[in-house]
Image (tube, rainbow, N blue to C red):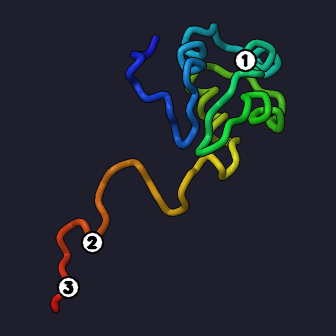
Amino acid sequence: MTDENEDSRKQGVEFGPLADELEDEEYPIDKAALLERYGDRELELEGDTTTIRTVLEAQGEATYESADDVRRCVIGMVSDEAIGRDNYSDRGGSTESEEGTEESV
């Protein structure tokens, strides 16, 4: 199980308690079985929610080999709504203006 304080938000998708359940699942698991068990579980996107069924329905037949495999597929299938603000990254680092570049007056 993951630490409760560990961030379950990946690439704009909040998996919440589903993250732990996916870790505890037995793999491989096919898409039909995954959706039967977890299809109605909600995922939080930036300012919105959707279900795992809604996200993965458009994907063809699939077999997932691990919880990471499921997360990667979900992240790859969510719409741009999960991104949040355009041209913004919460991955750290600094912008050029934050790196001490000063303009002369």
67 to the left or right of 58: left
CA gap between label 2 and label 1 equals 45 Å
Q: Which mark is residue 38?
A: 1
Q: The C terminus appears in which quarter of the rendering?
A: bottom left
Tag 3, which secondary structure? loop
On the image, which quarter does residue 5 sit in?
A: top left
Q: Residues within 10 Å of mark 2 (few under 14, many from 20)?
A: few
Q: Position of residue 75 (x, y in %)?
A: 62, 39
Q: Amino acid at mark 2?
A: Ser
Which residue lies at the image location 72% right of the left edge and 28% below the top edge? 52
Which residue lies at the image location 39% right of the left edge and 16% below the top edge? 3
Q: Tell me if label 2 and label 3 are in contact, CB under 8 Å.
A: no
CA gap between label 3 and label 1 equals 54 Å
Q: Position of residue 62 (x, y in %)?
A: 77, 27
Question: Image height check: is 52 above or below 97?
Answer: above
On the image, which quarter does residue 32 sit in?
A: top right
On the image, which quarter does residue 14 sit in?
A: top right
Q: Which residue is mark 2?
A: 97
Q: Position of residue 50 (x, y in %)?
A: 72, 35
Tag 2, which secondary structure? helix
102 to the left or right of 41: left
Q: Which residue is mark 3?
A: 103
Q: Amino acid at mark 1?
A: Tyr
